[in-house]
Image: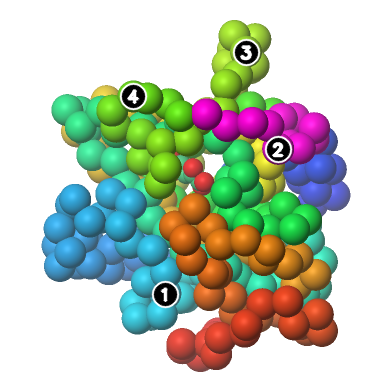
Amino acid sequence: MSLTQEQIKAYQTEGFVPKVQISDETEAAQHRELFDKLEAKVGREEALIGLIDRHFDEEFIWEIATHPKILNCIEALIGPNVMMLSTHFFCKYGPDQKKFVAWHQDVTYWGLEPPEAITAWYAIDDSDHENGCMRVIPGTHRPGIRDHGKSGQDGNLLSIDQEVPVSEEEEQNAVDLVLNAGEISIHHGTLIHGSLPNQSTRRRCGLTIRYVPPWVKQVNRNSLGRNWSAILLRGENREKNFTELPKPFPTK
Ligand SMILES: O=C(O)CCC(=O)C(=O)O
């Protein structure tokens, strides 16, 4: 299974693929149960945005990030050579926490040249308007990176409180990416996206998985002051731009 020509075209023109089913109900329930255990171990505060690159020690995260169905979709969009840079959970608990994700473009502070990256957002929980699903502004990936400022608002989950200004018209064009657990959306690294606070009593947790083709270079550290811990998942890494780490677990 991969993407249809229509989905590939939509990604090129709109900057995202809104929905692809990856896991059936049983597999999605297993992933949720394993995430629940991890959340219970680390606590909710850490689970918000503190679970970064845990695919190195939690096998279920590695399994999601390297799921053949996800990699088929990524390969259809960026070609046969696929490296993974990172995994990162975004969790929002409602209704009092008021955590949100301000409008931004992922690659702005990632230190990549050219700034080419792609994200699969895997729904651990059902994700809808009420619990603060991802929102995207179609087509905004095309002009490239815009200047970002600070949101200045409490509750922005982004690492350095970044926010990109958007016009009223763009805001009105925003699309909700409603997903069932076990589905993914895919977005381009320069697509403007964010999410509103969770107004429900249900958790909204998604795993973001960041991929690049190996011809991209890391020229600066990322917003966390780190180099990416890159792993080759498909094809070849002829360019050797990233220090390639070994796979922490076998792939299926
Ligand atoms: O999960 C969210 O609400 C936002 C995720 C996000 O900003 C990202 O994938 O870069």
Whether the residues at callouts 3 and 1 have beta carbons within 8 Å, the answer is no
The residue at 57%/49% (across/down) is 109
| Residue 161, horizontal then vertical, whole percent | 41, 36
Q: Is mark 2 within 8 Å of ligand 1?
A: no
The residue at 17%/28% (across/down) is 96
Whether residue 64 is in magenta: the answer is no
Quadrant of res 217? bottom right
Total labels drawn: 4
Report helix, strand or loop for mark 4. loop
State which mark lies toward you, 1 or 4.
Answer: 4
Whether the residues at callouts 2 and 3 have beta carbons within 8 Å, the answer is no
Q: Residues within 10 Å of mark 2 (few under 14, many from 20)?
A: some
| Residue 39, horizontal then vertical, whole percent | 21, 60
Q: CA distance from mark 3 to mark 1?
A: 37 Å
The residue at 68%/46% (across/down) is 188
Q: Is mark 3 within 8 Å of ligand 1?
A: no
Q: Is residue 50 left or right of residue 43?
A: right
Magenta residues, as a range?
139-149
Q: Is residue 97 visible?
A: yes
- In primary-sequence order, the first of circles 4 and 3 is 4
- Amino acid under label 4? Gln
- Amino acid under label 2? Ile
Report helix, strand or loop for mark 3. loop
Residue corresponding to mark 3: 167
Residue corresponding to mark 1: 55
